[in-house]
Amino acid sequence: MITSKNIGILLDLIKNSKKNIDLHLLVKKNSISFVSKNQSNFYIKKNTLEHKIKVSKFYESILKILIPILRNNKRLVIAQIGQSLDGRIALNNGNSHYINNPKSIIYLHCLRSISDAIIVGSNTIKKDNPLLTTRKIEGSNPKRIIIDGTLSLNNNYKIFNDGNENIIFTKSRKKVNLNNSTIIRLKEENFTKRLIIQLKKLKYKNILVEGGSKTISELINNQYIDILQLMIAPLLIGSGINSLNLKEISNLNKAIRPKYSFYQLENEIIVNLFLNS
């Protein structure tokens, strides 16, 4: 059976396998291994899956969303946003728990586990104080990259106290000491473009951009995001914080009209927008 205890192992195996071969796997309670076709109870051909073991609809949906990403040979930068139907990620007072189904956190941790690095802005750290790990599924943790233009963060936040590595990009010249962190200082002029150049030098294959709205919007405006993934919850909020604030256009002919795919994850819809295809 596929559960939170072994889905991280499964995703790791798929992530590290050759992309152009069919995968035959034997899934047991606490272990998963490659086997011959006759021994397998879990089978992946190209981007489709077949299985002879019990997989709940929830975990099967997760795998159907993530397998095409894992089987892609290209380097991908994925921005993920959880939002309401009317495009809000939080109330005006900052409250966002929970716009999306609490089980969607499991999906988010699966998405983190297939990523080599995760990017967030400093406001996300201040608002949510996240760990940015995969603790819900026991999967591989991505490297953490934080954009903190003014070096406003301090060692009181969780990410500076768990021993995992951080990379901080800033335009500030302040001298600060942040635990388990490498600080990379960039010139203020064209900061986002300089940031993207440095991110590309890090040579991570799959990168997840998890927030916030300002960070994701800036990276979309600079054509850095390959897939924008919207996790849309069935509720209307009205006033609140927008999920995106892209540069203004003067004519609808200039609107972004990407290719897309969509999936159902329990009572929510996940839409992939392929921005750079």
Image (cartoon, rainbow, N blue to C red):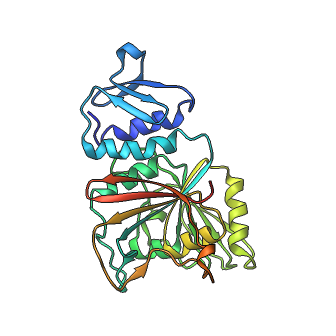
The residue positioned 53% from the left and 31% from the top of the image is 17
Q: Residue 84 location, x and y as percent?
A: 34, 72
Q: Residue 168 location, x and y as percent?
A: 60, 66
Q: Is residue 216 above or below residue 24?
A: below
The number of numbered discs placed on residues in the rendered structure image is 0
Q: Is residue 141 above or below residue 246?
A: above
Image quadrant in which the N terminus is located? top left
Q: Residue 248 location, x and y as percent?
A: 60, 82
Query: To which quarter of the image does residue 254 belong?
Result: bottom right
Q: Residue 219 location, x and y as percent?
A: 61, 68
The residue positioned 39% from the left and 24% from the top of the image is 25
Q: Nearer the viewer, residue 89 or 265?
A: 265
Q: Nearer the viewer, residue 32 or 277?
A: 277
Q: Nearer the viewer, residue 128 or 3?
A: 3
The residue positioned 43% from the left and 39% from the top of the image is 11
Query: To which quarter of the image does residue 52 belong?
Result: top left
